[in-house]
Amino acid sequence: TRMAELAEPFFSKGWIDAAVKPGKAPGAFAHPTVTNVHPYIMLNYLGKPRDVMTLAHELGHGVHQLLASKQGEMLSSTPLTLAETASVFGEMLTFRKMLNAAPDLQSRKILMANKVEDMINTVVRQIAFYDFECKLHDARKSGELTPENINMFAMKHYDNPTCVDEKEFLDDMKRFKYLKRLFRKYETSKGKE
């Protein structure tokens, strides 16, 4: 298919940095660089089904960035709602392939249950980040916010059952460099629709 053709050079030409290395940041992302150079994909790949889905998600971004680059520097930048639609498309193509290849009904049920849970968690989490961003930007209108102020604000804002303690929560927050771009998490959530 066309999607496979577009994704192939990411693998054959080494445009993916997937190896787990000491000091490598957690998470995953696709970086478009400039329009006359191919995009790169960064992630920590361990071969688990979740890693396969993460790679598929980032490949969705990468293929989209590759196609958008033909428009030149001024027009290749994409609103995040559209970018997340492309990445979720890549993710869902891979999920369908994995689901069709599942050896039995029990395996299919597990894949489907994990996918539904992932989608719900993503949307709930992204909306929580969006809500936090709105309140944080409102608070910023009253004056400067230090990292300590932001951390305290975040701890008060969230009742986060997925985090065991404050350090874990704040480490989780640091992985999302979302404060650089207003309302990014809302757009990620919209991409899941």
Image: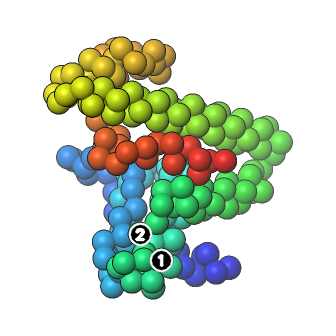
Q: Name above or below for residue 62 compared with residue 163.
A: below
The answer to whether marks 1 and 2 mark residues whose Cβ atoms lie closer than 8 Å is: yes
Instruction: Please state which of residues 22 and 167 is positioned toward the viewer in this rendering.
Output: 167
Amino acid type assigned to the residue bearing label 1 in the image: Ala
Q: Which mark is residue 77?
A: 2
Specify which label sits upstream in the sequence, 1 or 2. 1
Q: Is residue 74 left or right of residue 146?
A: right
| Residue 147 % position (x, y) | 18, 28
Count of labels shown? 2
Residue under the point 21% across and 22% down: 149
Q: Is residue 30 left or right of residue 86?
A: left
Q: Name above or below for residue 169 compared with residue 86.
A: above
Q: Name above or below for residue 73 compared with residue 119.
A: below
Residue under the point 45% across and 72% down: 65
Are there few (<14), some (14-19), or many (20+) residues within 10 Å of tag 1?
Answer: some
Q: Which mark is residue 20?
A: none
Q: Secondary structure at mark 1?
A: helix
| Residue 56 % position (x, y) | 54, 59
| Residue 104 % position (x, y) | 81, 45
**Quadrant (top left, top right, bottom left, bottom right) of the N terminus:** bottom right
In the picture as drawn, the residue positioned furthest to the right comes out as 105
Q: Secondary structure at mark 2?
A: loop
Which residue, given by chain and number where applicable, does mark 1 sit on? 68
Residue under the point 48% across and 61% down: 79
| Quadrant hosting residue 182 | top left
